[in-house]
Image (cartoon, rainbow, N blue to C red):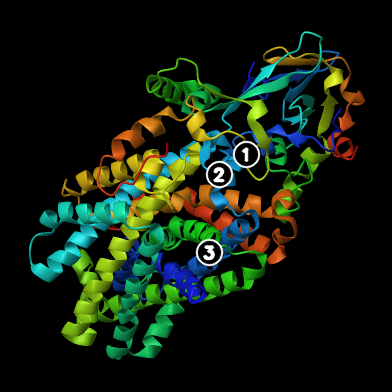
């Protein structure tokens, strides 16, 4: 059982934090997180991090958030927002570091991939990461 | 449920008194389990919690430290064991406000 | 050798924030109408931006991450978004003015109408942005920006009455026909033009790229203490030459080409050519820096990879946003909106966003869990708090003054 002293603040140390993959490539930010309540009456625990403009829009709410979420949802093929299983998280400081490679996480940043495919056709654009 | 929903919920103590919005959630670093809920009233309470004064991680600038002083003193920690219901929009405690540990003290344990 | 470059890089880039199109326009107007009576504002700007550039650099040195990465968690997603949208609007306007500035510099050199140069200028910017790594851009910009020192030379060459200059600088009040409202409006405009956001961005990312560590703090501080005052000196020189040449004659600065005229008066044709090169370099470089910094703002808000060291395809969303901004600015420039008016509105807008920019830096710099022993000391906090208080006042007064003085014309 972790002491309060060793615990972290969700507001300061987790929410809105930059997330990087195994190669230190930016993945996104912690826009929200999924919580599960166990059946045995214990406290909730985080199961996944929600990443992306859709997750952020749903969190912000209101007309601004709603528009953002709707726009982001339009750009995705997968109906549910991107989630990152919390078991993939290596450590949280200074940024959230994840064990996997971005390339192995297709549900995250699909817009980036889509644009990269197109941009790399232009001269001098370099290669999109595989 | 979502972390953002829990962080927007209002906390109610056992006698039905509203303790205001959730100011923060404390998490275990290995299991990502919720260790407890932070509440607190007072002027500039939002700033006190969002900018680290309530946790004691920020010592300055002097002006902000002074402005958030009262809110820092009023910050309280409710361990998960003191929470009866996590349910959306309202988190109900099974204790009274007076039984809650001040946050700074809780952080030392 | 790279250490020498790191040193000069900081210094040269610090100058940059004081010589882009917003500064050229504001300094020339101020000089022509108020002489050096707003000189104290430049002093405040130098102190202010130095304080925060040092903080941003120190944060980057400690965390090895750009200072703004922690901004969203301090400001919250909502406020951060507001600041972001604001800065996107400012950038579109500023880049529009910068493109016009490049085009006008080309018009000065070739006599071909500037609107015809605008698309070419935009294309040039796009090519450089697409192909040149950021560091190379900064170096070239910094070196070429040094040509702006010709304005300092011009002050000497014009053989002014120094006591007049000093008396003007020591009189913080409006000149005869001008009102206090206009005087205060230009305080806002100058602050907006001189406390340029991308300067902090540079010091923050530059510190990470140069792999500065806590032991390099002294070097960082020397960069700050040499670069920004030098930039301030340039700004004062532009005001001074406009004062000397235009004030007595009662000439209003209505055209960007007029900023270079006093140099021609003082140093002749050669001086004018150097000034044109300087203006071209300053506006071109500033366009790139502004675009880059804003693309970066969007990317870091959402947590995307951004193009500092990546090729376009490796930071696709960042590239798309930045190119989109450039296109929007080009379209705006082609609407024949007056660049001077747009510039003034842009710098006022920029001034009103400064608190959003500075506050998170001050907050993070005070966080002991992040900064450890490098957290702010009393000096940084006193200065920092004072600067933020000033920027909040400016932010509140900006639009009322803009409307009241109709953009400084009244």
Q: Can residue C37 be seen at all in this image of the molecule?
A: yes
Q: Which mark is residue C90?
A: none
Whether labels 2 and 1 share one chain = yes
Asked if residue C177 is positioned above or below residue A120 in the image, the reply reads: below
**Residue C193: image location, x then y, percent:** 39, 60
Residue at the top extreme of this rendering? A39
**Contact, CB < 8 Å: mark 2 with mark 3?**
no
The front one of C311 and B42 is: C311
C-alpha distance separating marks 2 and 1? 8 Å
Question: Which of the numbered marks, if any, corresponds to residue C210?
Answer: 3
Q: Chain of mark 1?
A: A
- SS at circle 3: loop
Relative depth, front residue between C229 and A23? A23
Kindly check if marks 2 and 1 are in contact, taking CB atoms under 8 A apart as contact.
yes
Residue at 10% x, 55% y: name it: C116
Instruction: From the image, tell me which residue sits under label 2.
Output: A24
Same subunit: marks 2 and 3:
no
What whole-number distance in Å separates the C-alpha atoms at marks 1 and 3? 23 Å
**Pointer 2 indicates a residue of which chain?**
A
Give me the C-alpha separation between circle 2 and circle 3: 18 Å
Most foreground residue, C129 or C19: C129
* Quadrant of res C220: bottom right
From the viewer's perspective, is C245 left or right of B31?
A: left
Q: Quadrant of residue B80?
A: top right
- The image shows residue A76 at horizontal and vertical percentages of 41, 21
Q: On the same chain: label 1 and label 3?
A: no
The first of marks 2 and 1 along the sequence is 2
State whether residue C200 is above or below residue A83: below
In the visual, does C253 lie left or right of C52? left
Residue under label 1, please give it: A97
Q: Is A37 left or right of C194, judged from the image as shown?
A: right
């Amino acid at each position: 059982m972790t002491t309060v002293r060793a615990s972290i603040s969700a507001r300061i140390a987790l929410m809105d934090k930059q997330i990087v993959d195994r190669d230190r490539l930016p993945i996104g930010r912690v826009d929200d997180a999924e919580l599960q309540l166990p059946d045995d009456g214990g406290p909730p625990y985080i199961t996944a991090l929600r990443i992306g403009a859709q997750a952020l829009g749903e969190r912000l709410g209101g007309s601004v958030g709603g528009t953002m979420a709707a726009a982001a949802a339009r750009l995705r093929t997968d109906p549910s927002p991107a989630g990152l299983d919390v078991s993939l998280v290596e450590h949280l400081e200074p940024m959230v570091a994840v064990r996997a490679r971005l390339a192995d996480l297709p549900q995250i940043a699909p817009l980036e991939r889509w644009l990269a495919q197109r941009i790399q056709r232009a001269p001098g654009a370099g290669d999109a990461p595989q | 449920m979502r972390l953002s929903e829990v962080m927007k919920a209002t906390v109610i103590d056992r006698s039905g008194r509203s303790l205001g919005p959730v100011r923060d959630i404390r998490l275990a670093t290995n299991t990502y389990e919720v260790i407890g809920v932070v509440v607190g009233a007072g002027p500039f309470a939002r700033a006190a919690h969002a900018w680290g004064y309530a946790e004691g991680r920020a010592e300055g600038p002097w002006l902000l430290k002074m402005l958030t002083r009262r809110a820092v003193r009023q910050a309280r920690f409710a361990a998960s064991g003191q929470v009866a219901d996590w349910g959306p929009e309202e988190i109900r405690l099974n204790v009274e406000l007076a039984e809650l540990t001040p946050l700074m003290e809780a952080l030392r344990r | 050798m790279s250490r020498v470059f790191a040193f000069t890089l900081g210094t040269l880039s610090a100058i940059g924030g004081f010589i882009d199109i917003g500064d050229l326009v504001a300094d020339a107007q101020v000089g022509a109408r108020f002489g050096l009576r707003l000189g104290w504002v430049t002093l405040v700007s130098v102190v202010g931006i130095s304080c925060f550039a040092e903080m941003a650099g120190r944060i980057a040195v400690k965390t090895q991450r750009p200072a703004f990465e922690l901004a969203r968690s301090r400001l919250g997603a909502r406020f951060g978004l507001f600041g972001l949208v604001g800065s996107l609007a400012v950038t579109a306007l500023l880049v529009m003015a910068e493109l016009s500035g490049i085009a006008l510099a080309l018009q000065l050199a070739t006599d071909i109408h500037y609107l015809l140069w605008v698309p070419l200028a935009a294309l040039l910017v796009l090519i450089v942005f697409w192909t040149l790594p950021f560091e190379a851009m900064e170096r070239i910009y910094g070196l070429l920006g040094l040509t702006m020192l010709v304005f300092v030379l011009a002050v000497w060459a014009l053989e002014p009455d120094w006591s007049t200059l000093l008396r003007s600088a020591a009189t913080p009040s409006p000149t005869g026909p001008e009102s206090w409202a206009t005087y205060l409006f230009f305080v806002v405009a100058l602050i907006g033009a001189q406390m340029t956001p991308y300067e902090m961005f540079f010091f923050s990312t530059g510190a990470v790229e140069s792999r500065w560590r806590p032991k390099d703090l002294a070097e960082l501080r020397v960069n700050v203490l040499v670069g920004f005052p030098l930039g301030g000196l340039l700004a004062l020189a532009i005001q001074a030459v406009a004062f000397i040449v235009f004030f007595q004659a009662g000439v209003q600065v209505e055209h960007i080409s007029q900023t270079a005229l006093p140099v021609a008066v003082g140093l002749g044709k050669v001086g004018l050519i150097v000034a044109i090169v300087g203006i071209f370099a300053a506006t071109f470089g500033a366009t790139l820096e502004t675009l880059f910094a804003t693309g970066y703002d969007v990317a870091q808000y959402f947590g995307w990879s951004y193009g500092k060291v990546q090729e376009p395809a490796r930071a696709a969303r960042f590239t798309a946003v930045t190119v989109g901004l450039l296109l929007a600015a080009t379209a705006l420039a082609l609407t024949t909106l007056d660049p001077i008016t747009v510039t003034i509105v842009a710098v006022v807008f920029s001034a009103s966003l400064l608190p959003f920019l500075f506050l998170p830096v001050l907050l993070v710099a005070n966080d002991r869990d992040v900064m450890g022993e490098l957290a702010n000391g009393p000096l940084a906090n006193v200065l920092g708090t004072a600067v933020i208080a000033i920027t909040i006042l400016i932010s509140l007064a900006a639009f009322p003054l803009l409307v009241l003085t109709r953009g400084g014309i009244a």
